[in-house]
Image: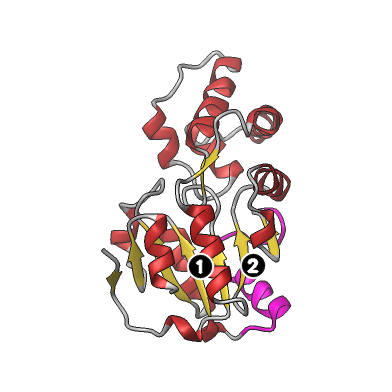
Amino acid sequence: MIQFNRQFSPSQLRLLIFDLDGTLVDSRLDLIHSINALLRHLQRPELPGDAIASYVGDGAPMLVRRALGDPSDEKFFDQALQYFLDYYRVHKLDYTQVYDGIKESLAAIHARNPKVQMAILSNKPVNPSRAIVEALGLGEFFVKVYGGNSFETKKPYPFGARQLLSETGTSAEEAMMIGDSSIDVLTGKNAGLWTCGVSYGFAPHTLVEVPPDVLVNNPHELTELFK
């Protein structure tokens, strides 16, 4: 059931900004495997999948830094990050898939609200983000796809969201940020947008810490929200 923490009218929205990992696609296994490949390369013990998944959301550098226990040797860290990025570039689509119901929901939202534009703002590097979006057949729905290295700052800083407002000619009160973590909610709040949390992603517990305006429990409820 859709949970409203703040009342609003979906009909006023003209721009929907989606997170990628844990919101549109389930990339959990490929991220876990890539981090553990790095740890094996460094002759370190592998980490449990749940632990690695909890590190996702702040971009690749922070994911690697957390997995390595925040190393102080920056040269070592840079080399480890590059190994992870190189490995993930090859293996990013081994198991990653679109969540059930997402394509149908995006298609329904577009059909019912043709004036509503949709974009992606991820903290994943932009090239793998765009490659995943295209490979999984989501590209047709989005006017823009930006990643964690598209701008000088990542989410939760609002620059990327504000850039999308500017590029689409949308005001903040006509836009919504949709994601699975407190980082996405904070991004929306920092940019003055409406916010929608999805509880089926990687970090639903963080949505308790920073409640969104609306909470949905599955992709089909996104369709209901914007009908």
Q: Amino acid at mark 1?
A: Thr
C-beta proximity under 8 Å, tags 2 and 1:
yes
- Quadrant of the drawing holding the N terminus: bottom left
Asked if residue 46 lies left or right of residue 170, the reply is left
Residue 186 on image: x %, y %:
45, 67
Viewer can see residue 63: yes
- Residue at the top extreme, as displayed: 43
Instruction: Characterize the local packing of mark 1: few (<14), some (14-19) or many (20 or more) Cα atoms within 10 angstroms.
Output: many
Residue 182 occupies quadrant: bottom left
- The alpha-carbon separation of the residues under discs 2 and 1 comes to 9 Å
Magenta-colored stretch includes residue 126 = no
User: Quadrant of the image for the C terminus?
Assistant: bottom left
At 49% across and 71% down in the image, what residue appears?
188
Q: Which mark is residue 187?
A: 1
In this view, 172 is above or below 75: below
Residue 196, percent across and down?
A: 41, 68
At label 2, the amino acid type is: Gly
Decide which of 210, 98 is in the foreground and name it. Answer: 98
Judge whether residue 151 is colored magenta: yes
- Residue located beneath label 2 in the image: 160
| Residue range of the region highlighted in magenta in the rendering | 149-170
Residue 17 vertical position relative to residue 52 in the rendered view, above or below:
below
Residue 109 x/y as whole percent: 52, 69
Q: Secondary structure at mark 2?
A: helix
x, y percent for residue 137: 65, 48
